[in-house]
């Protein structure tokens, strides 16, 4: 794993050599620093401006791929004409695309049922945030007191284990969050493939380079499929050799510097 800025010469020549760049970014922890409550992770107008400027260039297509529900993600980013993938890609929208995974749609009632159970039983533990995202759920425990995290984890396991045994859910964990999804073979990597396919169809015959930036475990599915010469996978955080990403930027501040520099290249 190499720091992206140390590989800038190679990166620049890849960007200059390709005809089209698909820039895909995660939201939380990538475009905005991780904060105590998810609703406080706001994109600054300066950063929105940087993204918009790139989106306006004909050589670039942009997409934001997040665990957040699609409508919320679109509102928080607030840039028209780009791709948005919500709920880890279970719902995707953008030029030429409007998809909701039908299996996830069918599992909506079950997610709601589970959300109710989590709220009822975790409500007594101060700081837990149960987020019903329609097609999936997030249980945040960043604000839970350290000595109560184990209790919260135990309750989480009690509620989810019968569902897991029946194969009705999948669980992933991220930064102080447990995520519950329908048991569908679908993840951010598949969202990347779906958007890439659409771009290839609309930019027929052009050479395409994909860049993906993300900071958490769910981004690994995207990193896994993006390598040179087809693309650049960039982990956001301190160097992490176990990551599937080939490059890294240490913090969201470096991501912002990167967006400015990228604009100069094409
Ligand atoms: Mg993230």
Image: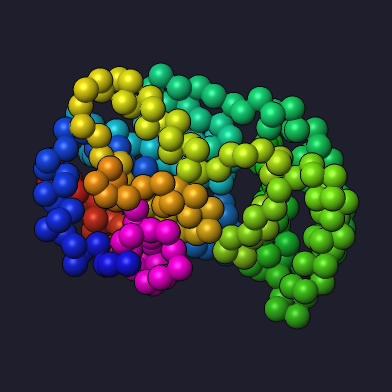
Looking at the rendered image, the quarter that the C terminus falls into is: top left
Q: Nearer the viewer, residue 49 or 232?
A: 232
Q: Is residue 244 magenta?
A: yes
Q: Residue 130, image x and y in percent?
A: 73, 53
Q: Residue 264, image x and y in percent?
A: 12, 47
What's the magenta bit mostly, secondary-structure-wise? loop
Whether residue 69 can be seen here? no
Residue 24 occupies which quadrant of the picture? top left
Q: Residue 137, image x and y in percent?
A: 69, 46
Whether residue 149 can be seen here? yes
Q: Read off the magenta span.
A: 233-252
Rendered residue at 75%/45% (across/down)? 169
Residue 144 occupies which quadrant of the picture? bottom right
Looking at the rendered image, the quarter that the N terminus falls into is: bottom left
Counting every numbered tag in the picture gives 0
Rendered residue at 48%/27% (across/down)? 93
Left or right, 16 with reference to 124: left
Query: From the viewer's perspective, is residue 137 above or below residue 60?
Result: below
């Amino acid at each position: 794993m190499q720091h992206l800025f140390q590989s800038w010469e190679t990166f620049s020549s890849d960007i200059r050599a390709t005809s089209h760049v698909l820039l895909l970014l995660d939201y939380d922890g990538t475009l905005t620093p991780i904060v105590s409550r998810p609703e406080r992770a706001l994109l600054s107008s300066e950063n929105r401006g940087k993204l918009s400027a790139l989106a306006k260039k004909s050589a670039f297509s942009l997409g934001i791929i997040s665990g957040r529900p699609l409508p919320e993600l679109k509102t928080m980013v607030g840039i028209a004409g780009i791709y948005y993938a919500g709920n880890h890609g279970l719902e995707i929208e953008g030029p030429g695309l409007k998809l909701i995974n039908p299996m996830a749609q069918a599992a909506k009632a079950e997610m709601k049922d589970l959300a109710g159970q989590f709220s009822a039983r975790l409500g007594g533990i101060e700081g837990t945030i149960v987020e019903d995202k329609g097609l999936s759920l997030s249980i945040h425990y960043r604000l839970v007191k350290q000595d109560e995290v184990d209790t919260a984890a135990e309750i989480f396991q009690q509620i989810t284990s019968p569902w897991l045994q029946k194969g009705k859910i999948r669980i992933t964990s991220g930064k102080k969050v447990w995520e519950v999804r329908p048991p569908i073979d679908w993840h951010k990597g598949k969202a990347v493939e779906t958007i890439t396919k659409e771009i290839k169809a609309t930019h027929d015959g052009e050479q395409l380079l994909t860049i993906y930036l993300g900071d958490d475990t769910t981004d690994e599915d995207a990193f896994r499929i993006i390598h040179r010469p087809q693309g650049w996978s960039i982990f956001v955080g301190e160097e992490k050799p176990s990551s599937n990403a080939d490059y890294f930027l240490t913090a969201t501040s470096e991501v912002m510097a990167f967006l400015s520099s990228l604009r100069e290249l094409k």
